Image: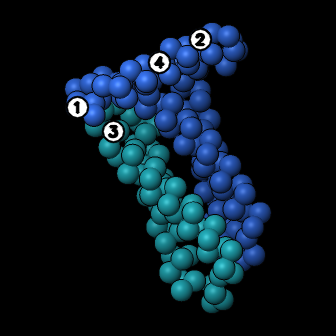
Chain colours: A blue, B cyan
Amino acid sequence: MATKSTLTKTLDDLAIATDLLLSTKNGVRTYAVALTETATPEVRKVLKKQLDETIELHGKIAQYMIDNEMYHAYDVEEQVNHDLKKADKALDLAKG
Amino acid sequence: MTKKLAMHETLEVHEILTLKTSCVTKGTAMLELVEDEKLKKILEEDVQTSTKAIDELQKILKKAQ
């Protein structure tokens, strides 16, 4: 179990932004699939509107991460190395 | 909307409701931890939009019952 202060240090802006990015990506996929399963026009309308909102949010958070050098979209090697380090940090945290 | 939903629609809307509920819960908790003002604004906006989305999804599900 990580202590509260360790959590606050670990759950920094990078972790929060990453989590938000993953949430919106998952959201866009889930909405798109659900939309193609609808039969009721009213339901379709609501899901389409919410899908559009989720796409907007994804654009904002992705751009934010690129602007703040949290996400190296144009340098895969750099991003992978960065993510390997983050994965190790997560493992250390879990070990306590 | 007078008609009941098809069963598979109920399941899909229910799944999305669960996803959004988790977003709002996590987002609200993370607002306490976030430092950067810009990121905080994005997060706040997400919590607001998702709260509205939950309300709309709940209405759909309640009508379906």
Q: Tell me the CA gap for discs 1 and 3.
A: 16 Å
Q: CA distance from mark 1 to mark 4?
A: 20 Å
Q: Is residue A33 above or below residue B37?
A: below
Q: In what element is the residue under mark 4?
A: helix
Q: Is residue A92 left or right of residue A5?
A: right
Classed neighbour count for the residue bearing mark 3: other residues with Cα under 10 Å, few (<14), some (14–19), many (≥20): some
Front-lying residue, B44 or A5: A5
Of the numbered discs 1 and 2, the one sitting upstream in the chain is 1
Please report the residue visible at 27 percent of the width from the left and 34 percent of the height from the top. A1
Marks 1/2: CA distance? Answer: 28 Å
Query: Same subunit under labels 1 and 4?
Result: yes
Which residue, given by chain and number where applicable, does mark 1 sit on?
A4
Residue in the picture at 59% in, 27% down: A63
Q: Which mark is residue A81?
A: 2
Task: State whether residue A23 is above or below residue A87.
Answer: below
Disc 3, disc 2: CB below 8 Å? no
Label disc, if present, on residue A55 of the rendered structure: none
Of circles 3 and 2, the one toward us is: 2
**Secondary structure under badge 3?**
helix
User: Which residue is denoted by mark 4 in the rendering?
Assistant: A88
User: In the rendering, at what x and y percent does residue B24 appear?
Assistant: 41, 52
Q: Nearer the viewer, mark 4 or mark 2?
A: 4
Q: Kindly identify the residue that appears in the image at 63 percent across and 67 percent down.
A: B12
Q: Nearer the viewer, residue A85 or B56?
A: A85
Q: Which residue is mark 3?
A: B31
Q: Nearer the viewer, mark 1 or mark 4?
A: 4
Chain under disc 2: A
> In the displayed structure, does residue A31 sit left or right of residue A20?
right
Q: Quadrant of the N terminus of chain B?
A: bottom right
Which residue appears at 69% of the width and 81% of the height? B6
Give me the C-alpha separation between circle 3 and circle 2. Answer: 29 Å
